[in-house]
Amino acid sequence: MFNTALTLSDLGFMARGAAITLSITAIAVLFGTILGVIFGTLRTQISALAAAPLTFVLDVLRSVPLLIQLILANAFQSILGFGWQPFAVSCVVLSLYTSSYCAEIVRGGIEAVPMVTRRAARSLGLSWWQDLAHVVFPMALRVALPGWIGLTLGVMKDSALVLWLGIIELLRSSQILVTRLQEPLFILIVTGAIYFLISFPIARLGGRLEKRWREND
Amino acid sequence: MNNYTFHWYQAFRAVPQMLGGAVVTLEVALLSMILGIGFAVLIAVGRGSQRAAIRGLATTWVEVARNTPALFQIYMAHFGLGAFGLHLSPFTALLAGITFNNAGYLAETFRGALRAIPPTQARAARSLGMGPVRAFTLIILPQMFRISFLPMTNQMVWAILMTSLGIVVGMNTDLAGVTQALNVKTFRTFEFFALAAIIYYLAAKTVTFGARLLAARLFRY
Amino acid sequence: MIEIENVHKSFGALKVLKGVSMTVKKGEVVSVIGGSGSGKSTLLTCINGLDRIDAGRVLIDGAEVHAKTTDLNVLRRNIGIVFQQWNAFPHLTVLENVTLAPRKVLGMSRAEAEEIAVKNLTHVGLADKLRVYPSRLSGGQQQRMAIARALAMQPSYMLFDEVTSALDPQLVGEVLDTLRLLASEGMTMICVTHEMRFAREVSDRVAFFKDGLIHEIGSPAQIFDAPEHSETAAFLNAAH
């Protein structure tokens, strides 16, 4: 049908790149979510004025291109003499980036919980913490989960940018193969297919969850 | 701390140049939005087409755009199309990639917006004697755009930020490209890119703020 | 005994309570009637501390609700409140809705809490809906669940804020029946209500509320048949 110089070991090379992509994504989503929950909850509990510095920083993280953030962070840590590996720099930047979007998702989820339901909970004698833990968070989770799944997939796709710092993730590994094998279209299609196969099922799952929960309410 | 002295003066002197790049950035973003919206409307309509081929094409565009990285889409435009004899310049490849991406996301937004418009609207328009195309463009589309206004604003900001990916395919006339060219010459990475970051931030905020003003004007009913 | 002494409350520029005073003794059922927006709901939320008052005092069994040293969470164990919107916790089943506070606030074991929950849910007629999610219940059923939820904490006082106003007419009866049952069992109740017939039947006293003040308070016979104030008469005439 068609001839390709792509060998099985080349696919293995790409698989290793995919593994790097997934590991960076996992780390960024883990830390980004933890921070995002803290920041998002904080923003709903303290006054707008007190939260202003945090709000500003998170807004900046969402308004500057991720690529620029990676370059800046790398230059900055080099100036300070940290000597971090590109992988570490990428994880830090991506975690903060993820946390800024996650904070918005968390905030939206918490604010979606009707105030009257929270007043009913407090009227029963539940403390502020108990209300948050047993009433607000479970309800907020339902609202926030589809958005969070979308964010996770977004981070997976954005992780391709770390190739600029020299990390050989999936897209970079495909570029290396293109340079060697000179079959840009085919290799790119394979690469796209890999991204697609990782992303599409999870996106569908999120969509189905959202629909199921919406029916239950 | 290393022996690094900040040379902000050098960076500030380059601001006019960087602003020139920012103009190119805005051009690419705006163009990609106009084209993207155009395609997105066609795709959104195509999703409801009777013919399976058109539906399939529309759905494929959306799913590929949303499930693969934007950088990949730009790479595809720059390197992939070469197999078909199409050698796009960095500018064109960047524009094509971002347009493809915009169209995919906006088509989904539009699809949701169209679903939110009651079918009685179209029926009322047709009952007045309007043909299907007129009913669509005069009655349905304006409502669809109004519902989609906020997501469209976000997509515009997104497009501006995405243009920075151009440096990966050799773009050197937009904000990121100019900054990178200066960086390569002077190695003052931090200073130059910090200023570029500020300009991106201001551009994003201006678009968001301007959109809010526009919305207040346009949607006074 | 609940003592309300000269309570004032404003929301921003809007003064909602302009010096309200009232005493409710143990075992009494007091209905509060009056036009919408007269401040009746706020009176109830000021009793359990959900809203803070600007001046005056609210005392429950001698304890001052709005004192800085008062632990509101402890106070609220003794006062149940049911709102116009039942505010069911959507992610919990009916049984879980009712057992949540006894378990987390009173520290009861799951078994103990469920026993009390089942007793109260049976009392309000929801014994067969224990494992159902609130979204599957009618408004009337959710409201009865809210009543059972408040009762499960075994409070001495129950406050009802227009609990039938948001219900379809055919569901109002079942909720009023529950309230009648509670009254007959000797629960101390303050009911803000628009249901005049119910107020007349069930109450020991009726208070007429208008523009942030109690204009008249007396027995049902007095208020409904021989009101002393013209405002009261005017309201009752308009209501019929």
Image (tube, coloured by chain):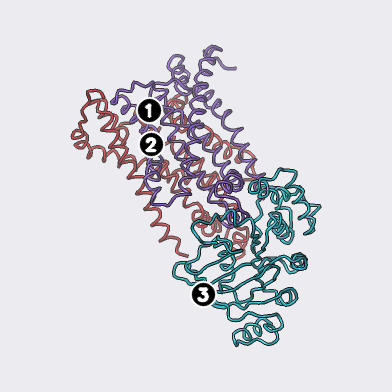
Chain colours: A purple, B red, C cyan
Few, some or many C-alpha atoms within 10 Å of disc 3 (few <14, some 14-19, many ≥20)?
Answer: some
Residue pointed to by mark 1: B169
Total numbered labels: 3
Structural distance between the alpha carbons of marks 1 and 2: 16 Å
* Label 2 and label 3 in one chain: no
Question: Residue at the front extreme?
Answer: C62
- Chain identifier of the residue bearing label 3 in the image: C
Same subunit: marks 1 and 3: no
Mark 1 residue type:
Val
Instruction: Give coordinates of residue A11: x percent, y percent.
Output: 54, 16
The three-letter amino acid code for the residue at tag 3 is Gly
Q: Chain of mark 2?
A: A
Disc nearest the viewer among 1 and 3 = 3
- In this view, the residue farthest toward the right is C128
On the image, the x and y values in percent for residue B172 come to 30, 31
Dots 1 and 2: beta carbons under 8 Å? no
Please report the residue visible at 26 percent of the width from the left and 40 percent of the height from the top: B20
Q: Is residue B48 left or right of residue C113?
A: left
Could you tell me how far apart the alpha carbons at marks 2 and 3 are, in whole angstroms?
58 Å
Residue named by callout 2: A65
Mark 2: give few (<14), some (14-19) or many (20+) Cα within 10 Å. Answer: many
